[in-house]
Image: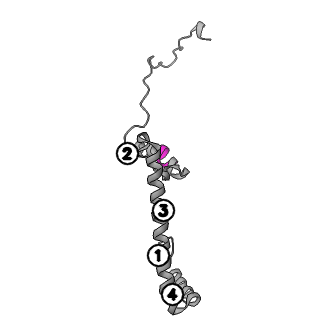
Amino acid sequence: MFGLGWPELLALVVIALLVFGPDKLPQAASQAGRTLRQLRQMANNAKADLQANLGPEFSNFDPADLNPKTFVRKHLLDDLENDWNGTPAVPEVVSPTPELGVGEIPPYDNEAT
């Protein structure tokens, strides 16, 4: 959880016990839980309001997509994963002219240069 191991969690519990005391620790924990629940509810309400006000064309909009890491992962790295899975991300380009053999001179277009 959040990169914390058992020793760190135990240290946090001991510090909380020293700061709040054994009689006020349950009250502080319940207040922290209530506050966290209210913050989640506010965030979900804000997200729902944003999606409702953006209109139907943004019905699948997720604010997490605005995070640069998520944006890069979604738009760039998905193509790489498709390459690794064997699905070509970029279609192959077929050359309009046949390949040249050894010693052959490529065609020259005077009007193109």
CA gap between label 3 and label 1 equals 14 Å
CB under 8 Å between callouts 4 and 2?
no
Nearer-N-terminus badge (3/1): 1
Amino acid at dot 4 = Leu
x%, y% of residue 62? Answer: 45, 50
CB under 8 Å between callouts 1 and 2?
no
Q: What residue sits right under mark 2 in the picture?
A: 85
Q: Front-most of 89 and 16? A: 16
* Quadrant of res 94: top left
CA gap between label 4 and label 1 equals 12 Å
CA gap between label 3 and label 4 equals 26 Å
Point out the residue furthest to the top here: 110
Amino acid at dot 3 = Met
Point out the residue furthest to the right here: 113
x%, y% of residue 41? Answer: 45, 64
CA gap between label 4 and label 2 equals 52 Å
Rendered residue at 46%/54% (across/down): 47
CA gap between label 1 and label 2 equals 43 Å
x%, y% of residue 2? Answer: 50, 70
Closer to the observer: label 3 or label 4? 3
* Quadrant of res 58: top left
The numbered dot on residue 33 is 1
Rendered residue at 49%/44% (across/down): 76
Residues in magenta?
72-77
